[in-house]
Amino acid sequence: MRQILYSKRLAPYLFILPFLVTLAVFWIVPIGRSFVMSFQEVLYGQATFIGTDNYERLWRDRVFWQALYNSMRYMILTIVLLVPIPMVLAAVVNSKLGNPRVKAFFKASLFVPALTSVVVAGIVFRLIFAESDSAMMNQVAEFFGFGPVRWLREDITGLVALLALALWRWSGVNTMYFLAGMQSIPTEYYEAASIDGASKFQQFLHITIPNLKPTIVYVVTISVYGGLAMFLESFMLYAGNSSPNNQGLTVIGYLYRKGIEENDLGFASAVGVVLLVIVMTINLTYLIASGTFKKEAA
Amino acid sequence: MTTQRTKMSALVAGLAVASLAACSGGGSGEAAPTQNSDGSTNLSMWTFADVHAAYYEEMADQWNDANPEQEIRLDVTVYPYEDMHNKLQLAVNSGEGLPDVVDIEVNKFASFVKGSTPPLVDLTEAAAPYADDVVQARLDLYSKDGKVYGFPTHVGAFVAFYNTELLEGAGIDYTTIETWDDFREAGAEYNAATDKAFGVASTGVNFVEPLITAQLGGEFFDAEGNLQVNSPEVVEALSMEQEMQDAGAISTIPGGSPDSEEAFGAINNGDYAAIVYPAWYTSRFVDYMPDLEGNVAIAPAPVIEGGAAQTIGGGGTGASVPVASPNRDLASDWLAFAKLSPEANVAVWEVLGFDPVNMAVWEDEAVTMNPDNKFNQYFQTNLFDVLNEVKGGIGHLDSFTDPNWPSVDNTFRTVTLNEIFENGVPAQDALDQTQSDLQNELGQ
């Protein structure tokens, strides 16, 4: 016993054991089960093997493709918005501009949305984007001379509401990531650049962004996953999983509808497996293309 | 040093074991009935409507008065509609965390009786003492293979609610509206005179569509259970509504259906003058539209001349007992009393304002004409006068009991009705598309 506990070779494995066990119990086993269930028809206490029937139905299902399109669109637009905007915000916070106290307050308030519950935020955004002309966004629209807009009943305006929610909620978190990245860039680089006569903008372009690459890769990777796995925001904004013409339905929303609302867990498992494959394909391609797996060339 | 280390490892190991035990706790087979020291039994219940909770508590009190040796302590939890059904679906699949009694809405019910071993108790025996007085069609809604799995709350016959103040202002007499053609003409006239909406084209609920389809003698499924949402009758029903919309007689409503918070505000505001909805909508007027008190008349729903039925039951809630409940026998007996007994059916009207399934109550004028009743005070006409008028013509749509009805209902509420009423897609095209989508979804 003593020998095992004090063995230098075994110790590292012992230390990571809790993580491995959690990973196996809550991740690998469920994924394996889902994979098996995706080939079954699952009813209360009965599971029948039905081959690839679930996948064939999925392939022909217009609603699934719509949900996938919605998720992809959301994922791409969140990356387009949630990489540059927080990066600029982080640069502002990191710069010598302004009073440090004001900036500390700014930094803290940016982060607050990430701490609020999506459920509460979704309900508040639903009220902000309500149809009636007394709702907040319609008053804003009226101020600019158009509207009332039926925000959550039209495809594009509904997407705008979802993106506004995402931007409000995640800007702060991404800003923190970028800020951490920026603070680890040695100041000598900037000093050398300014001696050579580079402008602030040139410094941002040629020093900050290249040195932020690992952070950018990380943020994009989690945004791909986060965007494709988005569910709660849409669920709360539309007060449930049903939106006009399924405009707010995401892949996870569809999985939830089939599995939980319509009790077709086999089919829902097939949706989950397909989503896993898509996310892994996009992320692995991206990580390989961005050179993350290569040994540091330095 | 060494002893400290040993102690620490022991502590860590202990914590790990404890947390694992905590995860697996609770799942130790069938529990025995749970009785309190005073002999009463705790029954937990889930529902999705506040008003239902008040009603069940009233019925628990009445049961305790009549059965002192079998007292129950009812604990009702109200969840939002979708959440409750999703929570229930997860619970029945895992077999844990279930209540003793649960309200299941009719459009969700079929999911819970899929397969050959439904997770709900067969209530046929508990229903037996009351079965003769109850509208059989409403029990059939919650039955499968001859077994009753849920008890109905109301008939939910479709009626029409007219805002007489607004109609008189436009010179329209609602009593002349008998058919859908009359309804369309009156609506067009009202719309031309006031530039306001008359009736409602719902995109978020699929209610009036089954009504007109049943009046035309159609179904959403054929006798073998094959989907036929583009059958001539369904197409005609939707085309009729589309014509009404074009004529200005019906319009879409904020919130997508009359039964939503945004719509309550709009109707209360006088933005809509005519609502064709199941009789239980009385409770929404009384609870959420206080400004209209005294201005609303109930009348029979518009019909098709020479149609197959005058009206049908719409919506509904079946109360069931999960098999996993340790108190299932007592729960079943109480539930039968709470939903089917004559006392219960009086309470259904007095507390909820619904049209009870026990039709004997419909003729009991002491109950139906009671001047102190808040529903009688609110409306200009008496609901039961209207109900008794159409009583012989209450038809039934078999499609409601089809196991695939939830999928049809869902697609209509999210896609089809939006395409027709919001995007102006012709009814035939929208229904052909729905037919092919659903055929794929259902594997037909």
Image: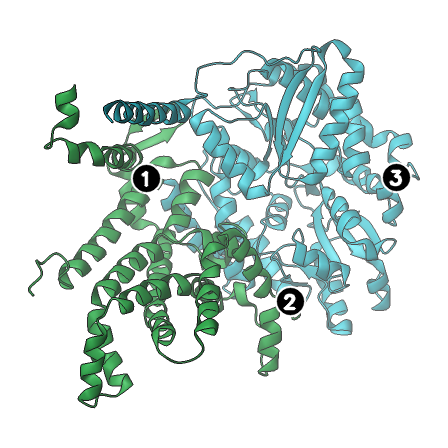
Chain colours: A green, B cyan
Q: A177 or A166, which is in the foreground?
A: A177
Q: The residue tagged with tag 1: helix, strand or loop?
A: helix
Quarter containing the N terminus of chain B: top left
Q: Is residue B234 above or below residue A205?
A: above
Tags 2 and 1 in contact by the CB under 8 Å rule? no
Tell me how far mark 3 sits from mark 1, CA to CA. 52 Å
Q: Residue furthest bottom?
A: A197
The chain containing the residue under callout 3 comes to: B
Q: Say if labels 2 and 1 share a chain.
A: yes
Residue B19 is situated, as x and y percent measured from the top left of the image, at 38, 27
Determine the chain carrying the residue at label 1. Answer: A
Q: CA distance from mark 3 to mark 2?
A: 34 Å
Q: Please tell me the numbered disc located at residue A46.
A: none
Quarter of the image that includes the C terminus of chain B? top left
Which amino acid lies under the numbered mark 3 shown in the image of this protein? Asn
- Taking the spot 79% from the left edge, 21% from the top edge, the residue there is B62
**Identity, as a three-letter code, of the amino acid under mark 1:** Ser
Q: Residue at x 48, y 14 (%)?
A: B30
Q: Nearer the viewer, residue A26 or B313?
A: A26
Left or right side of A286 for B392: right
Q: Which residue is mark 1?
A: A269
Residue receiving disc 2: A132
Q: Quadrant of residue B94?
A: top left
Residue of label 3: B373
